[in-house]
Image (cartoon, rainbow, N blue to C red):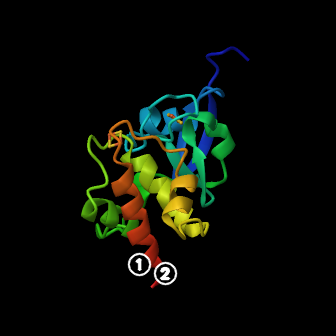
Amino acid sequence: MTSKTRIPIQLQINGRQHELEVEPRVTLLDALRDHLGLTGTKKGCDHGQCGACTVHVDGERVLACLTLAVQAEGRAVTSIEGLAQEDGTLHAVQAAFLEQDAFQCGYCTPGQIMSAVACIREGHAGSDDEIREYMAGNLCRCGAYPHIVAAVRQAAAEVAS
Ligand code: FES
Ligand code: FES
């Protein structure tokens, strides 16, 4: 097999099945952005250090830049594009980020939101310290951290109520 060999794979993204041909080394991040046009998931470092590429695979948060597309075959992938409801109603975390002004440039925001959804689901949003600890893998160059913590706190309270 040469480095240019492409293989057919099927990916289930946001509830839809996609068929594509990729080189075996293609990451899930590049498959989403370059092959499927789902550019909401951001490429920051491409080395597992910033969290901008966070998506969910079978409900667990993963770094799409460190996940091969072939590894996601047969699993349910959710990207930021799949978070809102079909009618456009925002997910509680998306709405909280807007209400709390939890972004400046917005580049880290999709990853922050995907991490926050998982953080709340995991039961790791019980206090600001816990939120900071379990959101630590998502960096924000703009330093919007206090607002991000406030948004996660708000969304966690709404989900619990
Ligand atoms: S782009 Fe994946 S962790 Fe930075
Ligand atoms: S809002 Fe700019 S990097 Fe986080």
Indicate which quadrant contains ligand 2. Answer: top left
Note whether residue 14 is visible.
Answer: no
Asked if residue 109 lies left or right of residue 21, the reply is left
Asked if residue 131 lies left or right of residue 82, the reply is right
* Element carrying mark 2: helix
- The residue that mark 2 highlights is 160
* Image location (x, y in percent) of residue 76: 59, 57
Task: Quadrant for the N terminus, please.
Answer: top right
Question: Residue drawn at (61%, 16%), measured in percent from left and top?
Answer: 4
Mark 1 neighbour density, 10 Å: few (under 14) some (14–19) many (20 or more): few
Question: Residue drawn at (49%, 28%), measured in percent from left and top?
Answer: 45
Mark 2 neighbour density, 10 Å: few (under 14) some (14–19) many (20 or more): few
What kind of residue is marked 1? Glu
* Image location (x, y in percent) of residue 157: 44, 77
Which disc, if any, is residue 158?
Answer: 1
Mark 2 vs mark 1, CA separation in Å? 5 Å
Task: Quadrant for the C terminus, please.
Answer: bottom left
Ligand 2 closer than 8 Å to the CB at disc 1?
Answer: no
Using the rendered view, name the quadrant where residue 130 is placed: bottom right
Name the residue furthest bottom.
161
* Image location (x, y in percent) of residue 24: 66, 28
What kind of residue is marked 2? Ala
